[in-house]
Structures are given as structure tokens and as C-alpha cells.
Amino acid sequence: MGNPKAFLTIERKEAGYRPIHDRIHDFGEVEQTLNQNDRRVQASRCMDCGVPFCHWACPLGNKPPEWNDALYKGDWQLAYELLHSTNDFPEFTGRICPGLCEKACVLNLMEHEPTTNREDEAAICEYAWEEGYIKVEKPERNEHSVAVVGAGPAGLVAANRLNHKGYKVTVYDARENAGGLLRYGIPNFKLNKEVIDRRMEQLKAEGIDFQFGTHVVSDKKNVAPIQNDPTLGKDKIVSFDELSKKYDAVIVCTGTPEARDLKIPGRDLDGVYFALEMLSQQNRVLAGEDIPKDQLVNAKGKDVLVIGGGDTGSDCIGTAHRQGSKSVTQIEIMPKPPVGPDDPNNPWPTWPRTLKTTSSHEEGCIRRWNINSLEFIGKNGKLTGVKVQPIDWKPNPEGGRPIMVEAGEPEIIKAQMVLLAMGFLRPKQPEFPENVFVAGDAANGASLVVRAMASGRDAAEKVDSYVTSKK
């Protein structure tokens, strides 16, 4: 702790976003960066607490006091080594993690101005790439091999960890490239895909074998299409049983591929889409893929209604703006969260479930809560609006889920496009052979990228223990 009084004399300073009038015209990252001097000054605010709750809050067990101190002292290489010791890919979490560690920071309890851990993390990693601190390392091989199914955050971490332990690792994925939702769900304005490509080059150079366009299934005779991408994964089909016999161990990191649907009248109208149909396609368009005009999911000139109040819904709002939408409305069936910074139901150091306003919301959006969707309305097979109704929630006298009650008259929200962003269904995994392990969202249901990464790391340790015990 180089400056023990910094938290008393230096205010929190965030890099902030690019101006709205500038950023809504492109898909470049909206978040800016501080210069290196300001970044080191911000790192000095970390108090090196006797009980560092940031360690506790981070699923990866990151150690902000250690790498913030190294950053403040100008030792960027040490800062990266400390950061990378717990976090395989800090360039991902430094951009898209909600910063659980910051909400648990003691400075957040005292002044609601926690240390800028997430931005510091991103800055450290970018500096490490620029200065060549991140190098290709080819480990000495053992005689064992592992298959990882799914090249999302959990799968990439598991593959990276096992590769460095000497295993011959093969990663299978049904899509044409790696990243999972990092590549095909999160918009470029939050995570530039060159960031993923840069790390992928390193992983390949270090010996990980990637097999794309391969659909791994439980039953080859009954292959279900991938939701939103029914044509994917048909190039090659293999079964988990085949992989379990070919490799010493298999890790299933297939995420939560099935989005929650809204099966109300009019669901089949042209104009009602799952959120990922839009987000995935837009990322592919930006990657240079040619999408037939009649298959485009585009909001240009349309009144857009986003159903679902989470991060995926926010991503739809920002994407709709950049596609040239006429208007954007977001509705949520649950009540409006309390306006922060404190949440009486989740006091510090737990995560406060307070109202979140993202960069996409700032760009323009009507937001409404306690709204239930009743019917999609259309004309000549095309969506024209959605019939909704204000509702309220009352306690269930028998306990459990609250009871929904009507709280107003039905109304129609004008819309030519609806995006369903209501979360994902937790997958039901079949019974696997004993050498098959499940990690990430495939095991725990949809959650944060940082939690998926932590799960992938834990799975790698389990596989190593399993293979070692068998040996």
C-alpha cells in the first residue's frame, strides 16, 4: 500500500463512455480509457484492507489489493502476473464483468466510491499485450488427452488450464469460431471481437486444437437443431459416448442454448424474435458474413419492444439504436428495483439489486416495470403491436412465488419488432460416463461470464485429479 491516504484525498474517476451522438453511429467499444498516470492514481486508492472483501466477492478469487499496489508503483508486469494468476482472460472480465469486487469494496460501504478494479484490470491486461508480457508458452506434454465441448468462457478456461498442465486438449464447438456468447451474444460495442481473436491466436500457438462446426450430441439418431442457428453444427456430428472413449476425460461447457420463450397468442407473427437472433446475426454481419436480405433481423425504421429487463435486453436496445430504430421500449414483468446505491434486502458486501442504467439505456429508451404481455397483434402475418397489462405482485399466503394480480387496463404498445430477452432455461444434462464433467452455465444455469470462467477452472482441477487418480 504505497499511499495510505490516497482514499482520503483522491476521488474515484471513471473513464466514462464516448459521447452518445458519436457512439450510436458505430459498433466500436463505448467505454473509454484513462491515461496511464490517471490509472495509477486510481489504483492508489485501494486500501489493502485487512479483510479484503473484494477477494470474497470475486468468483475467481482475484486479488485487487496486490495488483493495484503493483500498478500504483508502476510495475505493470508484476501487476499482470498477479492478475493472471487467478484470471486466465482479464481482457474479457475487464470489459464485461459487473464488478462484484467493487460492490464489496470497503470504500463502497463508506463513500460509495469503490476502487476502479474493473477498469484497472482491463488497463493492466492491455498494457501487458502492448509490452509483450504475454508470451506463447508451450508446456511439456504428458500422455493424457482431454476433450472440451464448447468454446465459451468456461470451455476456454478449462482448456487453457489443462493445456498448461501438459494435457493434449481438443476443443469442439458447433459454431464457426470460439467465444460462445462472448462472440455471438455480447455486442461489439461492449467487447470488440479482435480481443477474442488475439487470445485465440495464443491458445492455438500453445497447442490447443480447435474443431469447429462439430455438433456433439447425446444421441446421434436424434439431433436437435441449435436454437436461433438451426443450420449450425451439421458439418460433423459426434456423441459424448464416442468422446468419452477416445479421451481420458471430457468437459461439457455447452452453456444454456435454449432461451425462455413467450408462448402467447400471435407468437408466430413475423417480427417476433429471440434476442440472440438479432445479437448473434449483427455480430456475424460485422465479421463480414453475408446474410440474405430476407433473413435479416434489423430494427431500421421500426418501433422496437424489448421484453426483459436484464443485460441481454440492454444489449438489444443498444443494437437497435445502431441499426436505426424509430423508437425503443423495454418492459419487465417484475417490479422496478430500488434506486441505489444501497439495497436494504442485500446489504454490503453482497451485490445490491438496484436499478441499473446502462450505456444503452442512456442512448434513449422508454422503460416500464410490472408489465405483463398478453398477446402479439399483427396484420397480414406481420407484427403491429403487443397487448400488455399493468400488474402488481402480492405475497402468497402459502409462501413461495408471489401472486400476480391485475393493476390496470390492457393497452397496446405499437411495435413492428419484438425481442424476447427473458433469460435462458437451465439445461437438463443426460447421465454421462464417469469421465465426463460439466462446467459453466451448462452445469449451473445462465450466470455471469466470470462465474463461468471460475467453473471452467474448477472443472480443470477435477479432471486433473480424476486422471491422476486413474493413473
Image (spheres, rainbow, N blue to C red):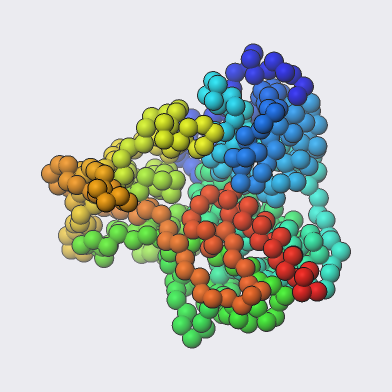
The residue positioned 48% from the left and 62% from the top of the image is 256
* Residue 329 visible (yes or no): no
Residue 56 in the image: above or below residue 107: below
Residue 351 in the image: above or below residue 107: below
* Residue 343 visible (yes or no): yes
Which residue, as the protein is rendered here, is positioned at the far left?
Answer: 409
Provide residue 58's location: percent of width, then percent of height: 61, 42
The residue positioned 27% from the left and 62% from the top of the image is 263
The residue positioned 73% from the left and 58% from the top of the image is 161
Q: Exactly how many numbered labels are in the figure?
A: 0
Looking at this view, is 432 or 263 the one in front?
432
Provide residue 408's location: percent of width, then percent of height: 15, 42
Looking at this view, is 144 or 170 the one in front?
144
Q: Quadrant of the N terminus?
A: top right
Which residue, as the protein is rendered here, is positioned at the far bottom?
Answer: 221
On screen, residue 99 versus residue 163, left or right, reads left
Q: Quadrant of the C terminus?
A: bottom right
Quadrant in which residue 155 is drawn: bottom right
Which residue, as the protein is rendered here, is positioned at the far front?
Answer: 398
Quadrant in which residue 201 is drawn: bottom right
On screen, residue 146 versus residue 29, left or right, reads right
The residue positioned 60% from the left and 81% from the top of the image is 241
Which residue, as the protein is rendered here, is positioned at the far top?
Answer: 9
On screen, residue 119 versus residue 384, left or right, reads right
Provide residue 100's location: percent of width, then percent of height: 56, 39
Looking at this view, is 54 or 186 the one in front?
54
